[in-house]
Amino acid sequence: MTAAGIVGTGSALPERVITNFDLEKLVDTSDQWIAERTGIRERRQAAPRETTSTLCIQASQRALEMAGLGPHDLDIIICSTISPDMPLPSTAAFIQHGLGARNVMSFDLAAACSGFLFGVTVAEQFIRTGKARYVLVVGAELLSRFLDYKDRATCVLFGDGVAAGIIGPVEPPSGILATTMRTDGNFAEHLYIPAGGALKPASCETVRAREHYIKMKGNELFKVAVRSLEEVCRNVLEKAQITANDLDLFVPHQANQRITEAVRERLGLCTEKVFSNISRIGNTSSASIPLCLDECVRSGRIRKGHMVLTAAFGAGVTWGAALMRW
Ligand code: ACO
């Protein structure tokens, strides 16, 4: 079996910054509430000319460059997104075309905030078994296009952004050491977009009722997120037979700084070993973990040999953790 790991990362963030003060002008909220309850101070918002796929292509080119590869080296392209350019065809098809990759299988994956880790787990299987050599996994969201800027409970949380990882063969002891991914559809309506699908097709009524926007029961999800993240982190540490003390860095999905803090405490990690960029980026769902990884790799916070634990939780609900030695 070939060991698989992340051999390149790249990001693409829209330039436009939306601060909490900007949102104070749209909904009944305050910088103080948002910062204290979530840790978020600003987030990015795509310009009208930007789409999920245009940012995907930029991030993927940067990841290929870091890996020292070209588009023709790719065997598979997986785009994790819940905010695709359009329902049909897949955003992955636009990425394939934009990169000029040949002979690749390209598809979208919908697992919300856990999607990048789900994609890495799929990619790992192909590389381990020798069925593929390099897999591009992109976490991509333009959630601003699906947010109700009249709903203060959701519009303050999410931001736009895209980041990519190239998964490929690596020399042990580097590589993906353990993964655990889970889903529980019992909580599906805790975070969903009611209309626009086959169940409730878009109509004037659904638009009038604002049902094409994200709806969330944040308070209830909070508790499920903390419990689930702790469980899955402990599970991968146990699989790899290491303890939290052996970690160099914990990179959690950036949903809420209070969730990160609660999980950090439960795992017994010191604050220096936990990465956070939520104050600048907000919750970018699928893009959250690869944006963090790219920032850490480029700033030297993650270096070769580091033991890195990543964990995510999102709509579905889905959750998962992946342990990697860089
Ligand atoms: N500004 C001011 N007040 C607000 C705002 C706001 N933006 N939003 C809600 N409030 C109010 C509420 O109306 C409520 O008022 P009330 O007490 O008068 O009824 C009060 O603040 C408390 O509301 P809660 O919902 O209990 O606030 P909480 O502390 O739980 O924070 C939050 C809300 C930030 C959404 C939090 O619950 C959270 O982060 N949940 C988890 C979200 C998550 O993990 N989602 C999954 C990943 S995302 C994905 O998959 C795409």
Image (spheres, rainbow, N blue to C red):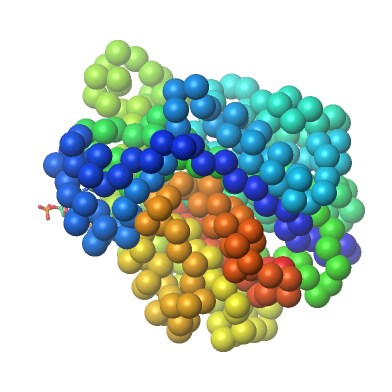
Q: Is residue 75 visible?
A: no
Residue at point 66%, 33% (across, down): 57
Q: Count the labels in the image.
A: 0
Front position in the image: 154 or 238: 154
Above or below, 277 against 236 in this view is: above
Residue at point 36%, 63% (across, down): 257
**Residue 225 in which image quadrant:** bottom left
Instruction: Find residue 229 and report its horizontal and vertical position in percent.
Output: 47, 67
Front position in the image: 245 or 229: 245
**Residue 150 in which image quadrant:** top left
Front position in the image: 181 or 264: 264
Front position in the image: 112 or 189: 112
Instruction: Find residue 161 and report its horizontal and vertical position in percent.
Output: 50, 42
Q: Is residue 248 visible?
A: yes
Residue at point 65%, 47% (across, down): 10
Q: Could you tell whether 61 is left or right of 221 in the image?
A: right
Above or below, 165 against 141 in this view is: below
Which quadrant does the C terminus fall into?
Answer: bottom right
Instruction: Find residue 184 and report its horizontal and vertical position in percent.
Output: 47, 54
Q: Could you tell whether 160 is left or right of 23 in the image?
A: right
Which quadrant does the N terminus fall into?
Answer: bottom right
Above or below, 247 against 100 in this view is: below
Q: Could you tell whether 199 is left or right of 306 in the image?
A: left
- Residue situated furthest left in the rendering: 28
- Residue situated furthest top in the rendering: 204
Residue at point 31%, 28% (across, down): 211
Instruction: Find residue 290 and report its horizontal and vertical position in percent.
Output: 59, 53
Q: Could you tell whether 300 is left or right of 210 in the image?
A: right
